[in-house]
Amino acid sequence: MNADQRKALQTLKTAKGQIEATIKMIEDGRYCIDVSNQILAAQSLLKKADLLIIGQHLRHCVMEAIENDKGDEKIDEVMHLLSKVIGK
Amino acid sequence: MNADQRKALQTLKTAKGQIEATIKMIEDGRYCIDVSNQILAAQSLLKKADLLIIGQHLRHCVMEAIENDKGDEKIDEVMHLLSKVIGK
Amino acid sequence: MNADQRKALQTLKTAKGQIEATIKMIEDGRYCIDVSNQILAAQSLLKKADLLIIGQHLRHCVMEAIENDKGDEKIDEVMHLLSKVIGK
Amino acid sequence: MNADQRKALQTLKTAKGQIEATIKMIEDGRYCIDVSNQILAAQSLLKKADLLIIGQHLRHCVMEAIENDKGDEKIDEVMHLLSKVIGK
């Protein structure tokens, strides 16, 4: 596991903790705006983890594929992913 | 707890499960694109939960405040939240 | 036209100018990263305009409907819009 | 200009037309929800144009840089851009 994957893993564990806290907030009848802000914080962590994963994918798998003349397929795959990440 | 809150709660529990699965995928050295797709699925669930929370907030807290002539403050609060949800 | 609608109008006119500038950048063969940053700036303005429109909709149409006991339909309509704005 | 840049250019021209239509809708006092939907349509076109620009950047500039052992800097630049596109 490389440094970016370790950071992504840590970020996802923090996100999981945030979601557990949010579940508890709803069960405790906490104010909706506070619940929504907590959900936003978890989303922010997921975006950060996703960027780490995409970044290390470009730096390792895609770069290696390009060096072995197999870059086109990998870039198509990344663009297909990004079209889902960025949305319509 | 109303129906939308219960649905949001269930959706967050599913999202938590997705994140646990994603953590395992990284630990198992699974392919980055698959990891990223799993993160996207969790984000999608968080958005769904957030919409349920915002919807029931409008239908209950905001509507009640407007009926009691205290709507302006509640709408400012919702718009402040939405500016964070929608982003810059 | 109220103050928020005037601001939204002005913001959209600025966004239009940004897009015209981006079109010229591509025609002039400018660097992709700079083009993409310019597109982001235009998106940011569109989000700002959209928030102004949604805000004044809540403050006027929705508030009025709630005061006339016709709030449910308006809130459903806003939530349908928000589900598209926030995405899946 | 390559095929993706031509498509991005065309998409931006369509987006510009959508924004002009939205400006007219506000000036004509059209219903807020319809205005907001029109803004969403323009945002969707900007995302599409941005994906085309990012895709051809990866396929040309980044791939070339990697083949010339200068990939790291280009990938850092792309990731910096994506962190803004994907948001926090």
Image (cartoon, coloured by chain):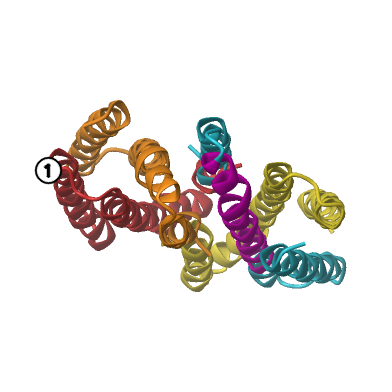
Chain colours: A red, B orange, C cyan, D yellow
Q: Quadrant of the N terminus of chain D?
A: bottom right
- On the rendered structure, is D1 left or right of A48? right
Residue under the point 56% across and 43% down: A87
- On the rendered structure, is A62 left or right of C4? left
Q: Which residues are magenta?
A: C40-67
Residue under the point 44% across and 53% down: A64
Within the image, what quadrant is residue D20 found in? bottom right
Q: Quadrant of the C terminus of chain D?
A: bottom left
Within the image, what quadrant is residue B21 found in? top left
Q: Is residue A80 visible?
A: no
Amino acid bearing label 1: Asp
The chief SS type of the magenta part is helix
Callout 1: residue from which chain?
A: A
Vertical relation: B87 (above or below) B8 = below
- On the rendered structure, is C25 left or right of A59? right
Vertical relation: C33 (above or below) A85 = below
Residue at numbered disc 1: A28
**Residue B2, image x, y percentages:** 26, 29
Disc 1 element: loop
Mark 1 neighbour density, 10 Å: few (under 14) some (14–19) many (20 or more): few
Q: Nearer the viewer, residue C25 or C40?
A: C40
**Residue A55, image x, y percentages:** 40, 58
**Residue D64, image x, y percentages:** 62, 63
Vertical relation: C31 (above or below) C78 = below
> Is residue A27 magenta-colored?
no
Q: Nearer the viewer, residue B68 or B44?
A: B68
- On the rendered structure, is C78 left or right of A19? right
Residue under the point 56% across and 50% down: C58
> Is residue C56 magenta-colored?
yes
Residue under the point 16% across and 46% down: A25
Q: Is residue A67 visible?
A: yes
